[in-house]
Image: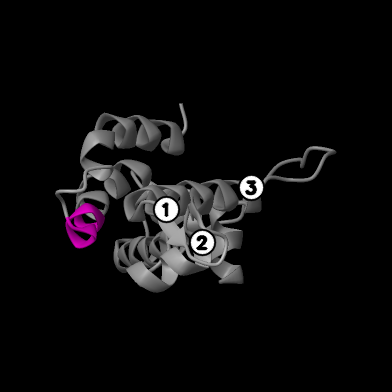
Amino acid sequence: MSASDTATKAFHGLRSLFKSYILFRKTKTRLYYTIIRPVLTFGAETWSLNQRTETNLLRFENNTFISICGPIYDGELNIWRRHYTREVRDQIAMPQVTDYFRSSRHRWLGHILRSKLDRFTSRVLIENIVGRKPRERTRTRRKNVVENE
């Protein structure tokens, strides 16, 4: 089960709160950042994000914020419609989930580099892997992601 699946379950468990007209948008945003985002980003320090996973995470977060903001009345078209992603990002003005992944990855990297060199995590990061590569394209390693950033 992926992180977005468990975060989706957490979001749907709290759906009545997020769709409530009693709670303010700021309260709903705090609920997202304290309950759902930790579920979504559990173990994010050790992930090596590829483009597909990054897109899925952004899509989940944008859809969550769109449902938090609720519908908006468009006076030009005389209809109720959902917010666009750029409208929601302007209203909420919080860092995206991918920025959180990058910062947590850098924080974890600093922790590893400060640790002793004989620890397993330090050796995996520093040493080169010996052996044959598979014929297909190699998987993106965490070390490569950190070096590219």
Q: Nearer the viewer, mark 3 or mark 2?
A: 2
Task: Calculate the distance from the C-alpha at mark 3 to the C-alpha at mark 1.
Answer: 21 Å
Task: Calculate the distance from the C-alpha at mark 3 to the C-alpha at mark 2.
Answer: 19 Å
Q: Which residue is mark 1?
A: 66
Q: Residue at x 49, y 57 (%)?
A: 125
Count residues near mark 3 (Cα–Cα under 10 Å), then give few for <14, some for 14-19, many for 20+: few
Q: Quadrant of the C terminus?
A: bottom right
Count residues near mark 1 (Cα–Cα under 10 Å), then give few for <14, some for 14-19, many for 20+: some
Query: First in sequence: mark 1 or mark 2?
Result: 1
Task: Calculate the distance from the C-alpha at mark 1 to the C-alpha at mark 2.
Answer: 7 Å
> What amino acid is at disc 1?
Ile
Horizontal side of 132 relative to 56 (left or right) equals right
Q: Which residue is mark 2?
A: 85
Q: Which residue is mark 3?
A: 52
Can residue 63 be seen in this snapshot? yes
Nearer to me, 87 or 133: 87
Mark 3–mark 2 contact, CB under 8 Å?
Answer: no
Q: Residue at x 58, y 69 (%)?
A: 147
> What amino acid is at disc 2?
Thr
Q: Secondary structure at mark 1?
A: helix
Task: Give the residues in magenta.
Answer: 24-30
Nearer to me, 18 or 82: 82
Can residue 121 be seen in this snapshot? no
